[in-house]
């Protein structure tokens, strides 16, 4: 069954944006929304993570868990998903020091 997904990208190569825009709409730069099957969602996410380079991406999609969704991330970010007793919470890393 198809379900809605949201993918947010930052500084990804143009060909990744093209691959995402074939299946999803882009209501704002780097933000993709659509309704696709789990197989298409996983293939799109695989394409994003394989070519992320110096960019970053986040995918949120429905799941059968307490929160009702799963968060996937790729690339270097200050925000990391932390599992806390089955809940996905966001943990901020300290800013890099020079």
Image (spheres, rainbow, N blue to C red):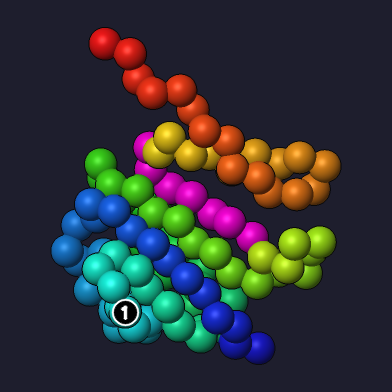
What is the x, y in percent for residue 24?
37, 81
Question: Residue placed at 25% from the left, 41% from the top?
Answer: 54
Choose top left, top right, bottom left or bottom right for residue 14. bottom left
What is the x, y in percent for residue 2?
60, 87
What is the x, y in percent for residue 79?
48, 39
Q: Is residue 19 visible?
A: no
Quadrant containing the C terminus is top left
The residue nearer to you, when weighing 18 against 67, is: 67
Choose top left, top right, bottom left or bottom right for residue 72. bottom right
Q: Is residue 30 left or right of residue 8?
A: left
Where does the magenta region start and end? 70-76
Q: Is residue 18 visible?
A: yes
On screen, 51 above or below 17? above
On screen, 5 above or below 80? below
Choose top left, top right, bottom left or bottom right for residue 70. bottom right
Question: Residue placed farthest to the left in the image?
Answer: 14
What is the x, y in percent for residue 80?
53, 39
On screen, 25 above or below 86? below
The residue nearer to you, when weighing 25 against 41, is: 25
Counting labels gives 1
Question: Residue placed at 65% from the left, 39% from the top?
Answer: 82
- Residue position marked by numbered label 1 in the rendering: 27
* Other-residue count near label 1 (Cα within 10 Å), few / some / many at <14 / 14–19 / ≥20: few
Question: Residue placed at 39% from the left, 23% from the top?
Answer: 95
Q: Main secondary structure of the magenta part?
A: strand
Question: Residue placed farthest to the bottom in the image?
Answer: 1
Q: Is residue 61 left or right of residue 86?
A: left
Q: Is residue 29 left or right of residue 74?
A: left
């Amino acid at each position: 069954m198809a379900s809605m997904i949201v993918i947010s990208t930052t500084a990804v190569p143009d060909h990744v944006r093209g691959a995402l825009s074939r299946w999803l709409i882009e209501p704002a730069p780097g933000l993709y929304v659509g309704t696709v099957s789990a197989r298409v969602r996983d293939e799109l996410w695989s394409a994003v993570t394989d070519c992320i380079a110096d960019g970053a991406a986040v995918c949120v999609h429905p799941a059968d868990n307490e929160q009702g969704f799963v968060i996937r991330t790729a690339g270097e970010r200050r925000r990391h998903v932390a599992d806390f007793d089955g809940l996905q919470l966001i943990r901020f890393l300290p800013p890099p020091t020079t």
